[in-house]
Image (spheres, rainbow, N blue to C red):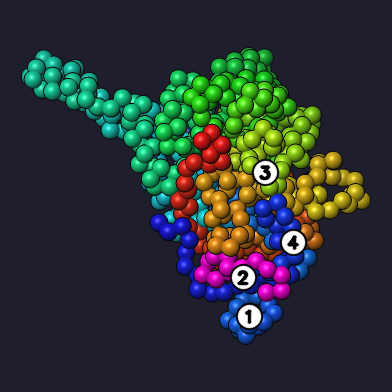
């Protein structure tokens, strides 16, 4: 599939403050055929004045950013609940979720395709392509969550062998021997995984996900180590959700035995140490495999301490966090009735000292630096980890106990606005005392790095995306910092019926969003849907280049 769609129209963005590559400058941008042709002050002077066919977008008073990239979403996800026979399915799909994303300034997402039982990695990828094709309103790529080292073919062959052995008294010995020989000649699970990675890397997948906890998706340390070794051959990136599964199970059982079943017990069942220990263990596995990795959802001060230790010993790796871990605390779980169920996510929301530690770390981000290095921040990007479930069903499940609630929080639509507001991007205004995050400050260049440039560099999209350089794809977000509104459930474009940020005042919105050179959003309203293209991503990200 093509990386961009042809776009014959010419667009000129005028009078904006262009933020890219760690710099800010007043300039215009000329876009032709879906690509950035020129970034220069006063482009309209001279011969361009006669080009009446150009569409002019006035960005006076606005920032012009590379289109925001949401590096981890879970649209259309399924949650398997211990003790339940059927998974809980998200009502939010590519059509609704990507419309919400692009309205908020996001031009590209990387969605997690979970390998289901009996599927190969190719099957999981095919299923995701079918879900997104002609439905996505922003560009999209895929992580594949590896849940089994074997393949569907292997599973079928082994089952056939077992059936033959069970019927040995009626089948000929020759048939049984032939089946056994076929089994012996089949590739091992690790070899099969390498073969599948080869095929999916050739189809533009440069990253894979593993989970250290979770019903039907959890892997052992040995399995994760095999996956790391397979990824190393392709210079592919392994993303890991880090929590100690055994201790999570122990603490959940402990809470339920003590009849503590409400949502307020959720953070108690997954304390920071559960996350920090798993991060330490995953980084040790990565060190033994000698491969850079990516840590999903860094949420706690204790986790940052483990990351710091690994950086000190010279490891190169990446880490990300989400708006809810920067702005919401575990007090949300104590809301009246079972309303706290809408905040259940894994890992859970943390306490104020954890939020402050994460915010302080983000302020160390070097806007023109290389993500993953020890001289840069220990958190390299802010994604949404967007996963939405029906709140009525969540509330119903919470009445049984907190562990029955499908975990997930929305964020694709308001990710940029929440961080822009909380970090007072581009302003030193101290007049508003009711801040989302007192003392949290980012420059426009830092904001751009965390929301667009670093994700592009880490996940194989740079410099074609995450950049406003000549030749880059014209995925561009023109951001109006003067706009303000209050988040309301009625304004959600995703499906699920709620947002955890309801009632929060935000500043800034996407005045214009260009996708592959085509204006798709004006004044926060989506005017062109289903324009997204598949992103063929390349392996060999910055941390690998440092090792060579």
Q: Are marks 4 and 3 in contact (CB under 8 Å)?
A: no
Q: Which residues lie in the magenta part?
A: 31-43
Kind of element beneath mark 4: strand
Inter-mark Cα distance, 1 to 4 = 21 Å
Tag shown at residue 48: 1
Asked whether the beta carbons under mark 1 and mark 4 sit within 8 Å of each other, the answer is no
For residue 214, side relative to residue 482 (left or right): left
Residue with the mark numbered 4: 25
Residue 535 x/y as whole percent: 48, 52
**Does label 1 or label 4 sit earlier along the sequence?**
4
For marks 1 and 3 on the same chain, the one whose residue lies earlier in the sequence: 1
Q: Label 2 to label 1, Cα distance in Å?
A: 10 Å
Label 3, label 2: how far apart the Cα atoms are: 27 Å
The magenta stretch spans residue 34: yes
Magenta span includes 132: no
> Between 545 and 138, which is closer to the camera in this rendering?
545
Label 2, on which residue?
A: 30
- Residue 528, by quadrant, is bottom right
Q: Residue at x 19, y 25 (%)?
A: 182
Distance of label 4 from label 3 (alpha carbons) = 19 Å
Quarter of the rendering containing residue 356: top right
Of helix, strand and loop, which one carries label 3? loop
**In this figure, which residue is indicated by the disc labeled 3?**
369
Q: Is residue 485 above or below residue 89?
A: below
């Amino acid at each position: 599939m093509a990386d961009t769609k042809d776009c014959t129209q010419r667009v000129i963005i005028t009078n904006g403050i262009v933020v890219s590559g760690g710099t800010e400058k007043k300039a215009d941008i000329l876009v032709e055929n879906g690509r950035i042709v020129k970034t220069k002050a006063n482009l309209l002077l001279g011969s361009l004045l006669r080009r009446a066919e150009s569409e002019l977008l006035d960005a006076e008073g606005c920032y012009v950013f590379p289109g925001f990239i949401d590096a981890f979403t879970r649209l259309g996800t399924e949650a398997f609940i211990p003790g339940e026979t059927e998974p809980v399915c998200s009502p939010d799909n590519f059509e609704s979720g990507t419309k919400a994303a692009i309205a908020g300034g996001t031009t590209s997402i990387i969605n997690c395709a979970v390998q289901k039982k009996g599927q190969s990695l190719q099957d999981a990828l095919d299923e995701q392509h079918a879900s997104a094709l002609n439905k996505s309103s922003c560009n999209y790529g895929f992580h594949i969550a590896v849940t089994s080292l074997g393949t569907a073919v292997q599973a079928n062959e082994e089952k056939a062998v077992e059936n033959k052995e069970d019927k040995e008294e009626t089948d000929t010995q020759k048939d049984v021997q032939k089946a056994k020989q076929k089994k012996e000649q089949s590739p091992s699970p690790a070899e099969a995984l390498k073969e599948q990675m080869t095929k999916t890397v050739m189809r533009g997948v440069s990253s894979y996900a593993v989970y250290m906890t979770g019903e039907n998706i959890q892997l052992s340390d040995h399995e994760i180590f095999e996956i790391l070794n397979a990824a190393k051959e392709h210079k592919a990136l392994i993303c890991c959700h880090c929590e100690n599964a055994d201790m999570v199970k122990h603490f959940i059982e402990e809470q339920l035995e003590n009849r503590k079943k409400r949502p307020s017990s959720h953070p108690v069942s997954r304390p920071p140490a559960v996350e920090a220990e798993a991060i330490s263990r995953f980084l040790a596995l990565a060190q033994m495999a000698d491969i850079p990795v990516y840590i999903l959802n860094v949420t706690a001060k204790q986790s940052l301490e483990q990351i710091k230790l690994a950086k000190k010993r010279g490891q190169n790796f990446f880490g990300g966090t989400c708006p809810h871990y920067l702005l919401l605390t575990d007090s949300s779980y104590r809301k009246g009735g079972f309303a706290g169920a809408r905040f259940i996510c894994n890992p859970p929301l943390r306490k104020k000292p954890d939020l402050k530690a994460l915010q302080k770390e983000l302020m160390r981000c070097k806007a023109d630096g290389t993500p993953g290095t020890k001289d840069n921040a220990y958190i390299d990007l802010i994604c949404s980890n967007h996963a939405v479930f029906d709140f009525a069903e969540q509330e119903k499940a919470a009445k049984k106990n907190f562990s029955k609630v499908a975990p997930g929080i929305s964020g694709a639509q308001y990710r940029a606005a929440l961080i822009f507001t909380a970090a007072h991007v581009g302003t030193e205004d101290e007049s508003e005392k009711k801040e989302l995050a007192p003392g949290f400050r980012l420059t426009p260049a830092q904001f751009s790095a965390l929301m667009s440039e670093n994700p592009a560099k880490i996940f194989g999209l740079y410099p074609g995306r995450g950049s406003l350089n000549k030749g880059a794809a014209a995925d561009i977000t023109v951001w109006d910092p003067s706009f303000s509104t209050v988040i309301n459930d009625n304004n959600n474009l995703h499906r699920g019926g709620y947002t955890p940020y309801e009632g929060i005042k935000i500043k800034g919105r996407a005045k214009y969003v260009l996708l592959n050179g085509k204006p798709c959003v004006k004044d926060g309203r989506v005017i062109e849907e289903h324009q997204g293209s598949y992103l063929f991503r390349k392996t060999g990200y910055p941390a690998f280049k440092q090792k060579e």
